[in-house]
Image (tube, rainbow, N blue to C red):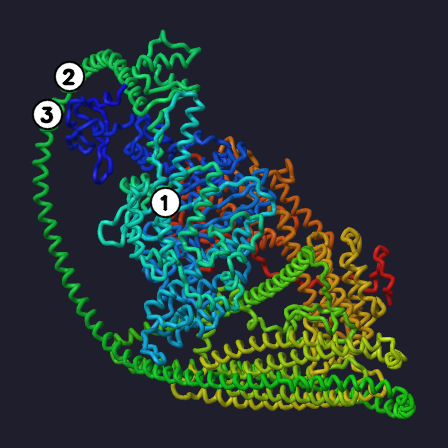
């Protein structure tokens, strides 16, 4: 049948329209070939006439309604543009379907809103489904590619294209998510995460806001997802194409630069070293005048980008360098150029430019890129011109310099972009060999703008290539279908765009001519355009531009595009001044060097198995010219096409429905442009050229069997029946063909069959309807007639009665109204008159009072202004003084640095090195002389025997002197008690005087109030005064209540601060342990990677020749491997006792919990108000300040004593060495005393802060000088050591004579030991000065705070009125107390000075005794190095002697400590220890400590405790993952700390001791600081134990808390037939058939039993389970907030029921039920929220009930909530009411959605004394400790 026969009256057609593109219309007449016009009626009821010259002018026919909304456009009967447009519009607007098939193409329309069709359930639904089985979806295309990958074993590719804002990137992202889900590997989950994590990074560096899209991709990318033989993702790689570099330096109006720039500006507070400012301050960011994107938080996006960088393996250093480069690009844009005239010798002045010396942008660029600032300043303004013979430097104008600057910025960003892609590829690479891959191509679509440039040309060129590949593929599939069905077909003609491609890339084509012009020295855009006009005019697809000579037109497959040639050459060259690149290459930054390294080196960083890592091809080494941009793009595009041609392609065309980004709004004009450009209409045309409509025989029969008679139907042969139907219906057999399984129709035939079918059905319907309607209407008429007659009769009577009644009522109403109206008017008049009189009376009085108050307020305002102006003047004066002081400090600092550099240069001179070497030569010479004089010393020793007797008598005198020293100590102790008592008396007197002063103030106030009352004259003023008195009384009561509340708040603040400080300390300790563990893992990895052959010395075998890394030198463990004694007294300056730590100084607000932040802030404000309001605070602050100064003085004096009391290692020294050490020590002491004196004076003068900085710098310089001396000494000793070894090993006579008695070898070994000690001393010196520097910084902060507080108090008192009697009295008291305090301090100082003198005498005499052969070196004398400084041992607590004795212990020999700890700690098995006495290892160690205390041997106790601590660390490192081991040593570490406290002798720990236990207390040692060390170890064990439990129960939490149902299927909302992918319910757990709740409770019970078996204290167990239940609550609540299927009323009941099991469990185990209930409160309240009623009346109750949930969490649950039966959301107005109510909440912390699962509560190890008697402890046989003997 001909299509002309379908143009009958009433037929629906499409006509062109200016606004709608295509408009629906109806034919008013039938068409015949002799007609020249047709009358139509549009859908807007407008009649039109169409001129018809031929059949081609006929309008397009509309498809029948049966085909409306088809999933596949090719299944439409009429395949033309309006049919496609209408079908897409219907699906998009009416059905909200965004996906539609068009043959093998998926058309995706951007909905501009979130559509919930991308969840895991949708992925599961489309898994293993055919591409037409379900509705169109991006997952269906991905599934089709994955199925072909599995079945056909061929590579696949998905090509996603479209214009900006159409949703290409999102579609590609969902495609990769699908592959990551269905192709995920259980053993390699990181690959999928990294593939998905690459998207935020690429969006940050490659996406930007445009006028069409807020997140537009400004580059193309091709991502290869690599699969192994099991078709799991094993790796990935990425190629990028044509990054829009021009956006870095320029943005059009209402557009932005790349997202990463705005992200780092938003995070400028976190990155202060980048010197960033607000984004509007940068030239490269403020041109578009649209800095923000609605609904996007750049700071959060930055955090997501950083997280993705961390996940993809970018190191912290690489990230920091990357951010520096990005920030430097912004600073480059802020470099300003100033026009100037450049003077040139022997030539005329040239026009140029310069950069000001103080240009902040250039300074920041030089600092961030670590380049030479002057070189960059020079080459930004100057250009080098190289000729054949000479080199010229040409100044650039400001305009040229700006262009050069922008080119440099674009080049740097491009190199950084390529490097990031390269690193991502390296990270996504896998060791597993690639079997097949799926490529996802996200590339820009065809673009045409008002002004098209080089970028649009490259984009359209790429689309031409892709369109050609698409056409060939579609043609191939179409022909394959015909061959498969066995039908006759002819070659289908399709549009071939090869001529257009030849025009672009052929020889002497556009690209070839462009490259040739770029190589010309004087090539320009105009000359290139002229060449195009000459060479390319022969191509049919090329033409000249309409206007001007700078444009040309290319006829692309989608449309004709006119390109402006201006800028083509510059963009194609992409030139950057080489001198600028050279300056950047000389950067000290490692990443900068890598970015600008040769291309082969950058590509060499990835492994060879990665095929392609960048779309930028490797340049040919033989070429001397740089490859142009178009050449690079052409090569990479050809490589891409080769890859695509080797794969099976799948196409996704993204359409942008409108430019306003309105959800589900369809603009026909915009849509048709994109459909033409993306090739969808070409697909339709190819389909319509053949047989587009295809029906299976069975479907055709069921649809059209109405067209045949019953006798023609053969149910056994449906094909034959179908042939009969078609033979009777369609006479032209060429319009259809029969295939093997389908019937193929030409366009329009299905519509004709539908018309025949409709006509047949209409005829049948008319026949049935006429009979049925006749019967219905007859019955209806008879019934209506009877009803009407009956109604008329009754209606007429009712109307008559109603009329009579109305007449009577009207007459009565008029009479009543007449009387009522009169009465109402009289009443109104009287009431109005009375009101007016009253208003006048009150108004006049009110106005009089207003005038009085106005005069009163004016007088008060004048008084206030007077005082405010005075205050402002004084404030301005202080600011000017402060600025002057700052300037003076800067000048002085400059001069000091200059002098410091000069002195440092002198110290490094050659003469200085010679002096150092001279000392070593003297030492070697002295050793040689000592060998010769050994025989003489034997004779002299006989003479010394007589002197020994005399020294013994002196020794007795020294002992007597020691007793005197002890008596002096007792006197000092008594004096200290007297001082404390005096201080307490002073405080009592102060309080009494304060009471007196307060009473005096109150008395004066009463007197003034009485006088004020007597001075009033009028009664009104008296009444007002009484009212004021009442207000004052109420305010006083309120003040008392406020004072009580303030005291309670301060008390709570102190407790919170203590908890926060403890939490901070524990966090730092855990971080330290994690870093140690990480360091050990790195070492193991290095050993495993082939570095086993490298010799790595440990600390105990470091020789003088070993080269140690500076960073490793500070991490030496406590046991150095030497037997030398090291004092720990100096460690007091590094770590004080925990009880004496000033937590207010060390704590910071950053580590406090969110709930304490607001409280601390409010309390701080209250304290400031109290200080400013109460004058007596001045006295207290001054006393506090004085006490702080005294403590500082004592601390500095202790340091001075440590430096002056260092011990010696060597027992014999020459007189010259001793004299040198003493002189150097005295010099150091004098310097420290001078510094102390200056520090005290500066503190008194208010200049303590600069002085502390100066001393810190001096100490640092001294440390560097000593380090250099040690290094030089090591070098000299190494050389001399080699000479000595050679001499000793030589078999010459000289060597045998020198080493005859072996003494020289012993001397050499002794010297070697000394060298080792010197190295360790250098390490200790560095650690000491680092700790000293930290302490000084803390001291500086504290002094600053005190100084500010003192200034506030003084300013408050100075700004007050004249000095009152109270102030005078207080001044007198301050003077008296200060004088008394100073007298007492003078006495204390005198006593301390005497003690120091006696100690010096004692050390001097002991030294003499050692020189004469004695061995009475004091035990408490610290070690002194050769440099004259005392060397503290880092992290080793100090031990103080006591004058007590004890009984009972385990004795052992010196040197057996390691063997003891090996048997007791390292080799002890948990299963063995569980059968022993709880805490037995701790008791044994403590009894050994008592033995060392009995011997009064400090070295023994140090060695013992260090051995125990190190053994414990080894056990933690080796078996830290074993729960039983961790529980065992947590119990023992805690028990040892408790024993140290119990037997310390401190009264606070003796309240439960027996008298015998008190007698067994330690008498000589104070181990309080070692208690802190073992507490830290116990804390590490605690956290390790918590982590182990969390890892075990993590998989059980969600099934047990959220998903477990006591009655299966109770919720009723689970989808039937499939499980949610990724849900924990679908994963088999080890518990098997056991209930999840029971499994979790069983796991908790097992851990609880282990803790009790190993003797862990009950308080510690409660804290452990409190932390565990916090983890359970956080994990379950976070999961609940991300799962909609769990948010319903039924689930709330189930969750609450499941939680009740755990509450009962805690009660049964006697744990801290209240604390655990608080930790579970958020999930409990979430369950209650799900169960609660949700109406407007319940808003307040819901907000009050959910006190433990944050507002975002409440709103999230309400948004996710679904009704159990109707699956509807909560009404929006209810959620809005809840949000408004939640805003009234006081902000108690950060309003986060998810709880921090890693948060740890601060731990408190409560003191728990042992009831076990030490004398009853026995060592069992299972512990092999024969070296211990019980005494």
Q: Which residue is label 3 attached to?
A: 800
Residue 604 makes an appearance in the image: yes
Label 3: element kind: helix
Which structural element holds mark 1? loop
Q: Which mark is residue 789?
A: 2
Q: Residue at x 19, y 17 (%)?
A: 784
Picture disc at residue 445: 1
Quarter of the figure that contains the C terminus: bottom right
Quarter occupied by residue 960: bottom right
What is the C-alpha distance between the residues marked 3 and 1? 82 Å
Name which of mark 1 and mark 2 comes first in the sequence.
1
Whole-percent x and y of residue 1267?
Answer: 65, 78
Extreme residue in the front direction: 389
Please name which of the two marks, 2 or 3, marks the residue nearer to the observer.
2
**Disc 2 to disc 3, how far (Cα)?**
18 Å
**Percent from the top left, x then y, of residue 1328?**
65, 76
Q: Residues within 10 Å of mark 2 (few under 14, many from 20)?
A: few
């Amino acid at each position: 049948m001909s299509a002309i026969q379908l143009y009958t009256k009433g037929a629906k057609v499409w006509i062109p329209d200016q606004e709608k593109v295509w408009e629906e219309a109806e034919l008013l007449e039938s068409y015949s070939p002799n007609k020249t016009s047709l009358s139509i009626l549009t859908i807007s009821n407008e009649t039109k006439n169409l001129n018809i010259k031929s059949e081609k002018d006929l309008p397009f026919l509309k498809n029948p309604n049966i085909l409306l909304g088809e999933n596949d456009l090719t299944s439409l009967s009429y395949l033309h543009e309006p049919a496609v447009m209408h079908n897409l519009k219907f699906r998009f607007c009416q059905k909200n379907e965004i996906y539609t098939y068009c043959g093998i193409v998926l058309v995706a329309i951007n909905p501009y809103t979130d559509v919930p069709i991308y969840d895991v359930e949708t992925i599961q639904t489309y898994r293993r489904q055919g591409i037409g089985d379900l509705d169109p979806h991006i997952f269906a295309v991905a599934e089709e590619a994955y199925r072909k990958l599995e079945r056909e074993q061929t590579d696949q590719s998905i090509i996603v294209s479209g214009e900006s804002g159409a949703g290409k990137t999102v579609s590609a992202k969902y495609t990769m998510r699908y592959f990551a889900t269905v192709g995920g590997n259980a053993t390699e989950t990181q690959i999928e995460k990294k593939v998905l994590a690459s998207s935020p990074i690429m969006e940050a560096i490659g996406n930007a806001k445009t006028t069409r899209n807020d997140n537009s991709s400004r580059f193309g990318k091709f991502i290869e997802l690599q699969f192994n033989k099991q078709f799991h993702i094993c790796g990935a790689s990425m190629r990028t194409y044509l990054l829009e570099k021009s956006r870095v330096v320029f943005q059009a109006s209402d557009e932005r630069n790349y997202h990463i720039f705005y992200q780092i500006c938003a995070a400028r507070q976190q990155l202060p070293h980048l010197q960033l400012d607000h984004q509007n301050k940068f030239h490269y960011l403020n041109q578009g005048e649209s800095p923000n994107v609605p609904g996007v938080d750049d700071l959060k996006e930055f955090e997501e980008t950083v997280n993705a960088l961390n996940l993809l393996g970018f190191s912290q250093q690489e990230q920091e360098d990357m951010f520096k480069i990005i920030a430097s690009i912004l600073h480059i844009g802020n470099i300003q150029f100033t026009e100037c005239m450049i003077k040139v010798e022997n030539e005329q002045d040239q026009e140029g430019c310069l950069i000001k010396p103080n240009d902040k942008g250039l300074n920041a660029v030089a600092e961030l890129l670590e380049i030479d600032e002057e070189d960059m300043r020079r080459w930004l303004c100057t250009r080098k011109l190289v000729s054949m013979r000479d080199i010229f430097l040409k100044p650039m104008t400001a305009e040229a310099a700006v262009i050069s600057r922008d080119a440099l910025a674009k080049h740097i960003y491009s190199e950084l972009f390529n490097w990031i892609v390269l690193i991502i590829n390296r990270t996504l690479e896998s060791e597993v060999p690639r079997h097949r891959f799926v490529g996802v191509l996200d590339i820009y679509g065809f673009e045409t703008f008002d002004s098209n440039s080089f970028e649009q040309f490259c984009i359209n060129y790429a689309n031409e290539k892709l369109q050609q590949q698409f056409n060939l593929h579609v043609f191939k599939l179409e022909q394959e279908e015909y061959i498969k069905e066995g039908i006759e077909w002819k070659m289908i003609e399709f549009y071939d765009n090869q001529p257009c491609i030849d025009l672009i890339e052929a020889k002497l084509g556009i690209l070839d001519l462009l490259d040739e012009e770029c190589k010309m020295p004087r090539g320009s855009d105009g000359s290139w355009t002229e060449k195009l006009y000459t060479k390319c005019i022969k191509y049919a697809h090329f033409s000249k531009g309409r206007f001007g000579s700078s444009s040309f037109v290319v006829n692309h497959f989608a449309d004709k595009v006119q390109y402006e040639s201006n800028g083509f050459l510059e963009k194609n060259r992409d030139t950057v001044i080489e001198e600028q690149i050279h300056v950047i290459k000389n950067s000290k930054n490692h990443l900068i060097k890598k970015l600008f390294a040769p291309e082969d080196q950058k590509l060499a960083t990835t492994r060879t198995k990665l095929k392609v890592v960048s779309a930028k091809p490797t340049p040919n080494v033989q070429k001397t010219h740089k490859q142009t941009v178009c050449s690079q793009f052409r090569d990479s595009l050809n490589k891409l096409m080769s890859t695509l041609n080797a794969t099976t392609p799948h196409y996704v065309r993204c359409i942008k429905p409108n430019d306003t980004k309105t959800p589900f709004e369809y603009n026909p004009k915009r849509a048709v442009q994109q459909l033409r450009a993306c090739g969808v209409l070409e697909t339709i045309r190819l389909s319509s050229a053949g047989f587009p409509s295809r029906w299976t025989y069975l479907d055709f029969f069921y649809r059209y069997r109405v067209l045949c008679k019953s006798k023609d139907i053969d149910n056994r042969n449906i094909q034959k029946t179908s042939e009969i139907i078609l033979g009777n219906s369609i006479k032209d057999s060429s319009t259809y063909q029969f295939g093997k399984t389908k019937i193929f129709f030409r366009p329009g035939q299905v519509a004709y069959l539908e018309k025949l079918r409709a006509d047949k059905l209409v005829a049948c319907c008319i026949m049935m309807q006429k009979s049925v309607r006749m019967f219905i209407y007859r019955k209806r008429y008879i019934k209506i007639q009877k009803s009407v007659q009956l109604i008329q009769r009754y209606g007429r009577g009712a109307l008559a009665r109603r009329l009579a009644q109305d007449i009577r009522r009207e007459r009565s109403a008029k009479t009543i109204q007449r009387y009522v109206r009169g009465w109402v008017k009289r009443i109104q008049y009287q009431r109005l008159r009375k009101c007016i009189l009253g208003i006048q009376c009150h108004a006049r009085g009110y106005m009089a009072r207003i005038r009085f108050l106005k005069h009163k307020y004016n007088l008060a305002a004048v008084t206030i202004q007077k005082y405010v102006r005075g205050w402002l003047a004084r404030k301005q004066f202080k600011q000017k003084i402060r600025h002057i002081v700052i300037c003076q400090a800067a000048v002085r600092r400059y001069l000091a640095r200059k002098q410091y550099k000069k002195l440092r240069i002198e110290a490094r001179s050659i003469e200085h090195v010679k002096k150092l070497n001279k000392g070593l030569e003297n030492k070697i010479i002295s050793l040689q002389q000592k060998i010769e004089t050994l025989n003489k010393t034997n004779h002299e020793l006989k003479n010394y025997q007589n002197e020994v007797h005399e020294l013994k008598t002196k020794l007795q005198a020294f002992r007597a002197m020691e007793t005197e020293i002890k008596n002096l100590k007792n006197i000092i102790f008594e004096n200290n008690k007297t001082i404390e008592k005096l201080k307490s008396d002073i405080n009592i007197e102060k309080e009494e005087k304060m009471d007196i002063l307060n009473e005096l103030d109150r008395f004066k106030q009463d007197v003034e109030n009485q006088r004020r009352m007597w001075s009033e004259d009028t009664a009104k003023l008296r009444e007002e005064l009484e009212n004021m008195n009442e207000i004052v009384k109420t305010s006083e009561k309120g003040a008392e209540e406020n004072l009580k509340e303030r005291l309670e708040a301060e008390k709570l603040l102190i407790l919170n601060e203590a908890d926060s400080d403890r939490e901070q300390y524990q966090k730092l300790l855990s971080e330290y342990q994690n870093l140690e563990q990480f360091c050990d893992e790195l070492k193991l990895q290095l050993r495993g990677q082939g570095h086993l052959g490298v010799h790595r010395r440990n600390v105990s075998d470091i020789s003088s020749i070993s080269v140690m890394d500076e960073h490793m030198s500070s991490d030496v463990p406590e046991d150095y491997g030497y037997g030398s004694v090291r004092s720990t007294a100096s460690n007091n300056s590094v770590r004080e006792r925990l009880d004496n730590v000033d937590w207010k100084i060390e704590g910071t607000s950053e580590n406090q919990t969110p709930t304490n932040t607001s409280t601390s802030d409010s309390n701080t404000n209250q304290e400031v108000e109290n200080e400013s309001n109460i004058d007596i605070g001045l006295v207290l602050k001054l006393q506090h300040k004085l006490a702080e100064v005294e403590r500082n003085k004592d601390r500095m004096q202790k340091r001075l004593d440590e430096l002056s009391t260092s011990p010696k290692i060597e027992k014999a020294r020459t007189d010259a060495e001793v004299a040198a050490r003493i002189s150097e020590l005295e010099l150091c002491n004098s310097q420290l005393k001078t510094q102390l004196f200056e520090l005290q004076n500066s503190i008194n003068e208010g200049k303590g802060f600069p002085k502390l900085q100066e001393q810190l710098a001096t100490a640092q310089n001294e440390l560097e000088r000593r380090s250099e001396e040690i290094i030089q000494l090591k070098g000299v000793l190494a050389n001399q050591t080699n000479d000595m070894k050679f001499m000793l090993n030589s078999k010459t006579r000289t060597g045998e004579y020198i080493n005859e008695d072996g003494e020289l070898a012993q001397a050499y070994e002794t010297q070697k030991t000394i060298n080792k000690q010197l190295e360790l001393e250098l390490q200790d010196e560095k650690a000491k000065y680092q700790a000293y520097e930290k302490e000084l910084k803390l001291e500086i902060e504290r002094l600053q705070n005190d100084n500010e507080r003192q200034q506030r108090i003084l300013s408050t008192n100075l700004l007050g009125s004249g000095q009152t009697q109270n102030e005078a009295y207080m001044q007198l008291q301050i003077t008296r107390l200060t004088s008394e305090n100073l007298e007492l301090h003078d006495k204390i100082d005198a006593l301390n000075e005497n003690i120091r003198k006696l100690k010096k005498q004692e050390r001097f005499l002991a030294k003499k005794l050692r020189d004469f052969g004695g061995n009475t070196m004091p035990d408490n004398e610290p070690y002194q190095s050769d440099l004259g400084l005392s060397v503290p041992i880092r992290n080793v607590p100090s031990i103080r002697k006591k004058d007590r004795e004890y009984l009972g212990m385990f004795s052992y020999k010196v040197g057996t400590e390691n063997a003891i700890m090996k048997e007791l700690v390292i080799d002890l098995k948990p299963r063995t220890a569980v059968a022993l006495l709880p805490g037995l290892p701790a008791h044994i160690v403590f009894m050994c400590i008592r033995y060392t205390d009995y011997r009064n041997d400090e070295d023994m106790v140090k060695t013992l405790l260090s051995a125990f601590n190190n053994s414990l660390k080894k056990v933690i490192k080796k078996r830290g993952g074993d729960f039983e081991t961790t529980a065992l040593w947590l119990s023992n570490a805690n028990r040892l700390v408790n024993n140290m406290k119990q037997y310390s002798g401190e009264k606070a720990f003796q309240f439960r001791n027996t008298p015998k236990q008190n007698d067994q207390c330690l008498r000589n040692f104070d181990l309080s600081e070692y208690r802190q060390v073992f507490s830290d170890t116990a804390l590490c064990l605690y956290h390790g134990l918590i982590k182990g439990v969390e890892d075990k129960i993590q998989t059980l939490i969600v099934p047990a808390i959220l998903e477990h149902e006591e009655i299966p299927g109770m919720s009723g909302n689970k989808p039937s037939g499939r499980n949610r992918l990724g849900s924990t319910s679908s994963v088999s757990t080890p518990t098997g058939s056991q209930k999840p709740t029971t499994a979790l409770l069983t796991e908790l019970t097992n851990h609880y039993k282990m803790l009790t078996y190993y003797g862990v204290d009950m308080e510690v167990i409660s804290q452990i389970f409190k932390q565990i239940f916090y983890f359970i609550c956080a994990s379950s609540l976070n999961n609940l907030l991300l799962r909609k299927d769990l948010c319903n009323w039924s689930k709330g009941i189930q969750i609450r029921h499941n939680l009740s099991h755990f509450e009962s469990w805690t009660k049964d185990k006697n744990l801290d039920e209240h604390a655990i209930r608080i930790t579970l409160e958020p999930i409990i309240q979430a369950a209650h929220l799900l169960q609660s009623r949700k109406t407007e009346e319940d808003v307040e109750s819901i907000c009050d009930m959910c006190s433990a949930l944050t507002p975002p969490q409440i709103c999230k649950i309400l948004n996710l909530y679904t009704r159990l039966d109707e699956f509807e959301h909560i009404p929006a107005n209810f959620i809005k009411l809840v949000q408004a109510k939640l805003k009234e909440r006081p902000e108690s912390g950060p309003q986060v959605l998810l709880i921090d699962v890693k948060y740890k509560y601060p731990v408190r190890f409560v003191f728990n004394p042992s009831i076990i008697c030490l004398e009853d402890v026995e060592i069992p046989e299972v512990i092999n400790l024969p070296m211990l003997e019980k005494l």
